[in-house]
Image (tube, rainbow, N blue to C red):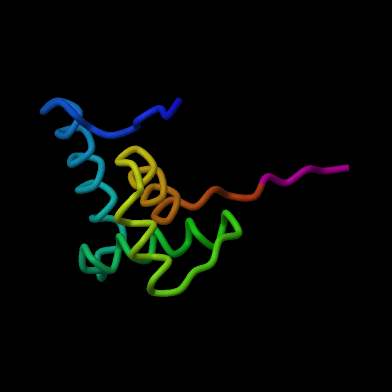
């Protein structure tokens, strides 16, 4: 059974758009399209998937809203590697 992770209500869409606006303001020199394509490309690379123009277009077309939001957030705010001391 597929679990949809898309924004379907106006309130959910508003949250997604607010998060997108917040993320877009972090790398101030990127246009919106660049932000989205770069985030999807990084997501594909991080998950070991093929990353070319066609793969990015395909992934972007079929990516659920929550997954896109997460990919953009990880692109803008990359996780810092945890350091363990011995």
Total count of labels:
0
Q: Is residue 9 left or right of residue 46?
A: left
Q: Position of residue 15 (x, y in %)?
A: 21, 32
Taking the spot 21% from the left edge, 62% from the top edge, the residue there is 32
Instruction: Point out the residue furthest to the front here.
Output: 1
Q: Is residue 47 left or right of residue 6?
A: right
Give residue 4's quadrant in the image.
Answer: top left
Taking the spot 44% from the left edge, 64% from the top edge, the residue there is 41
| Residue in front for this viewpoint, 81 or 6 | 6
Instruction: Point out the residue furthest to the right here.
Output: 86
Q: Is residue 69 left or right of residue 41?
A: left
Taking the spot 68% from the left edge, 45% from the top edge, the residue there is 82
Q: Which residues are magenta?
A: 82-86
Q: Is residue 37 magenta?
A: no
Q: Position of residue 61 (x, y in %)?
A: 29, 55
Q: Main secondary structure of the magenta part?
A: loop
Q: Is residue 86 left or right of residue 37?
A: right
Taking the spot 30% from the left edge, 63% from the top edge, the residue there is 35
Instruction: Point out the residue furthest to the bottom here.
Output: 53
Instruction: Point out the residue furthest to the left here.
Output: 10
Does residue 15 lie above or below 57 as drawn?
above
| Residue in front for this viewpoint, 70 or 5 | 5
Q: Position of residue 85 (x, y in %)?
A: 82, 43
Q: Position of residue 54 (x, y in %)?
A: 39, 71
Quadrant occupied by the C terminus: top right
| Residue in front for this viewpoint, 1 or 37 | 1
Quadrant occupied by the N terminus: top left
Give residue 69's quadrant in the image.
Answer: top left
């Amino acid at each position: 059974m597929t679990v949809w992770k898309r924004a379907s209500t106006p309130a959910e869409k508003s949250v997604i758009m607010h998060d997108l606006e917040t993320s877009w303001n972090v790398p101030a020199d990127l246009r919106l399209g660049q932000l989205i394509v770069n985030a999807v490309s990084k997501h594909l690379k991080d998950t070991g998937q093929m990353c070319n123009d066609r793969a990015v277009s395909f992934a972007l077309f079929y990516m659920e809203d929550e997954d896109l939001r997460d990919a953009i957030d990880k692109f803008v705010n990359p996780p810092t590697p945890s350091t363990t001391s011995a």
